């Protein structure tokens, strides 16, 4: 399995509090992604990073910010958590798209976040 | 990226072949067909991908019709551990123009249940 860890794995918080989720990789992959998964919606891309300090928005980025200060870590922050952000969050990594034969993304184990 | 259509659920007996169909009638010439699966509570896992030729790896085979409007993922000898949601995704490996990234758009997928 690709070396991807997410922390915490479970978190319960209250509306209005800030929350930071961490994704850590040991594969030295350049690209990193944050997805959320909700019933009836599948996985949706929140933000992605194509290098250190290089990030961009995905399709559901409102209410989220990200930072990547080093290759191995990609942080997802909810500045003021809302109940609509209750979800399972997955981090993924990949080599630069088009650089290899497969272009697959490797996913972490997920973080289950509950906002009360 | 082209949209895909998959049956919501399928059943398969253990030891038999599981054939999962996917329609992608609007696929364009530079789009690949990717298959991922997600076992309960885990992150998605890459299975296989192809452009127009049939492909086989240690996990599965991918059969793409000559007109590329549909494909079938084949698990030759399904086991109970293959019970999962299977996602068919059509995409280009790299965005056209701008910063490239391998965006994955997950639909609802097919819930495959393998029975003893």
Image (tube, rainbow, N blue to C red):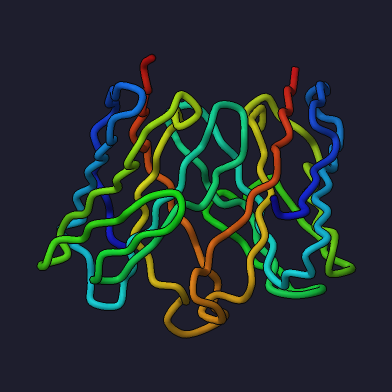
Residue depicted at x 47% and y 76%: B94
Residue A64 shown left or right of residue B72 in the figure: right
Q: Quadrant of residue B44?
A: top right
Residue B100 position within the rendered picture, expressed as x and y whole percent measured from the top left: 54, 78
Closer to the camera in the image, B104 or A104: A104
Q: Quadrant of residue B3?
A: bottom left
Query: In this view, which residue lies farthest toward the right?
Result: A69
Query: Which of the image's four quarters has the N terminus of chain B?
Result: bottom left
Residue B33 position within the rendered picture, expressed as x and y whole percent measured from the top left: 33, 61
Residue depicted at x 40% and y 52%: B35
Residue depicted at x 28% and y 35%: B18
Residue A28 position within the rendered picture, expressed as x and y whole percent measured from the top left: 79, 70
Vertical placement of residue B59 versus A47, above or below: above
Closer to the camera in the image, A80 or B109: B109
Residue depicted at x 62% and y 34%: B42
Residue B5 position within the rendered picture, expressed as x and y whole percent measured from the top left: 23, 44
């Amino acid at each position: 399995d690709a070396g991807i860890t997410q922390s915490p794995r479970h978190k319960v918080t209250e509306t209005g509090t800030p929350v930071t989720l961490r994704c850590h990789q040991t594969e030295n992959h350049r690209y990193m992604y944050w997805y959320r998964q909700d019933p009836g919606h599948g996985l949706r891309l929140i933000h992605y990073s194509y290098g250190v300090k290089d990030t961009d928005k995905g399709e559901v980025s409102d209410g989220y910010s990200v930072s990547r200060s080093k290759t191995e870590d990609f942080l997802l922050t909810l500045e003021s958590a809302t109940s609509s952000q209750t979800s399972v969050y997955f981090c993924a990594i990949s080599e630069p798209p088009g650089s290899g034969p497969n272009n697959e993304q490797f996913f972490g184990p997920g973080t289950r976040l509950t906002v009360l | 990226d082209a949209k895909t259509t998959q049956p919501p659920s399928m059943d398969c007996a253990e030891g038999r072949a599981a054939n999962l169909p996917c329609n992608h009638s609007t696929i364009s010439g530079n789009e690949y067909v990717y298959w991922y699966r997600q076992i309960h509570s885990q992150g998605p896992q890459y299975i296989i991908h192809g452009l127009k030729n049939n492909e086989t790896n240690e996990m599965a085979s991918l059969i793409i019709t000559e007109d590329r409007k549909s494909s079938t993922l084949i698990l030759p000898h399904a086991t109970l551990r293959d019970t999962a949601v299977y996602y068919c995704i059509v995409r280009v490996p790299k965005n056209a123009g701008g910063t490239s990234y391998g965006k994955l758009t997950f639909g609802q997928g097919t819930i495959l249940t393998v029975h003893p």
